[in-house]
């Protein structure tokens, strides 16, 4: 389980460190943290832990760029969304229709000129294991097959139901984060205005399909991924 500390201040006076075998083994187990982009993956916003934003792949160059063709197109899932109704059901409709209904019920829900919109995509997708992971302008977490363009799963935190996002660039997201312990525990997380969502494939044995589909989704208010027993939704 991940732990987050807001601030940690340590004072050291005359302390000597001894490199024990346990420390060395811990460093070796953490070798996965030194990932790069050599294998075509893009595991962090800047590509690697140095945020170099560079890939050494060279199959596409100035000589063949003009010969490229569109392999697939992806339609944003923000175009049609749902609203949670008082009876717990989900009403699906185009985004503009959902926004109109929310404004009719709560006239001051959004700041003037800052309504939810599907055209604010400004995200850098991650690519891990042949799957693209990113969040949409409305903070929906998405996994897309990088080869076919098929949408594998979507998690909607309903940020548009909370009102206008507090950041200056409203209803825009730059990307998600990927974490793994190098031993099978993999997590994708995003941070909409109302909290944090986290998708995890945490050793759920037979419940985990042999694909890039994640097994469970958690939604929480500014916390880290909880343990599997606190799962609130399943894909």
Image (cartoon, rainbow, N blue to C red):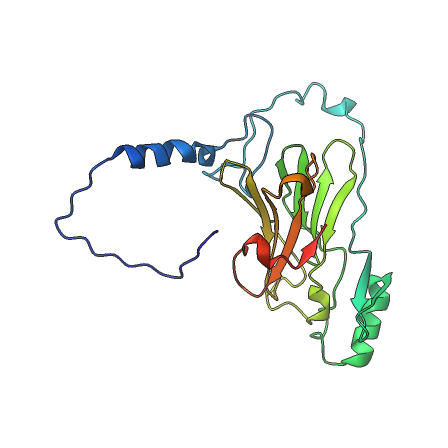
In the image: residue 82, left or right of residue 49: right
Is residue 159 depicted above or below 104 in this figure? above
Q: Residue furthest front?
A: 206
> How many numbered badges does the structure rendering display?
0
Is residue 212 depicted above or below 235 in this figure? above
Q: Is residue 191 visible?
A: no
Is residue 29 depicted above or below 231 in this figure? above
Find residue 84 and report its horizontal and vertical position in percent. Answer: 78, 69
At x 67%, y 44%, the residue is 214
Name the residue nearer the viewer: 180 or 204. Answer: 204
Q: Quadrant of residue 23?
A: top left
Q: Is residue 14 visible?
A: yes
Find residue 81 and report its horizontal and vertical position in percent. Answer: 81, 60
At x 15%, y 47%, the residue is 15
At x 69%, y 57%, the residue is 233
Name the residue nearer the viewer: 195 or 213. Answer: 213
Name the residue nearer the viewer: 124 or 18. Answer: 18
Find residue 209 and report its horizontal and vertical position in percent. Answer: 70, 38
Q: Quadrant of residue 68?
A: top right
Is residue 109 depicted above or below 191 in this figure? below
At x 81%, y 35%, the residue is 72
Q: Residue furthest left?
A: 14
Find residue 133 and report its horizontal and vertical position in percent. Answer: 66, 43
Name the residue nearer the viewer: 170 or 135. Answer: 135
């Amino acid at each position: 389980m991940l732990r987050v500390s807001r601030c940690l201040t340590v004072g050291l006076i005359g302390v000597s460190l001894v490199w024990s075998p346990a420390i060395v083994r811990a460093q070796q187990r953490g070798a996965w943290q030194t990932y790069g982009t050599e294998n075509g993956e893009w595991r962090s916003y800047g590509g690697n832990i140095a945020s170099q934003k560079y890939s050494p792949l060279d199959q596409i160059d100035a000589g063949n760029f003009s010969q490229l063709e569109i392999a697939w197109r992806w339609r944003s899932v923000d175009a049609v969304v749902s609203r949670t109704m008082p009876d717990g059901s989900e009403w699906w409709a185009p985004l503009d229709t959902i926004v109109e209904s929310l404004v009719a019920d709560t006239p001051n829900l959004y700041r003037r000129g800052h309504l939810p919109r599907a055209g604010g995509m400004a995200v850098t997708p991650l690519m891990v294991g042949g799957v693209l992971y990113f969040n949409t302008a409305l903070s929906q977490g998405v996994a897309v097959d990088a080869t076919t363009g098929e949408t594998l799963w979507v998690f909607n935190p309903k940020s548009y139901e909370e009102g206008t996002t507090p950041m200056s660039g409203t209803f825009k997201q730059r990307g998600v984060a990927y974490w793994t312990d190098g031993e099978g525990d993999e997590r994708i997380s995003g941070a909409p205005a109302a909290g944090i969502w986290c998708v995890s494939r945490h050793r759920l044995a037979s419940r985990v399909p042999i694909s890039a589909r994640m097994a469970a989704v958690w939604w929480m208010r500014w916390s880290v991924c909880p343990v599997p027993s606190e799962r609130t939704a399943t894909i």
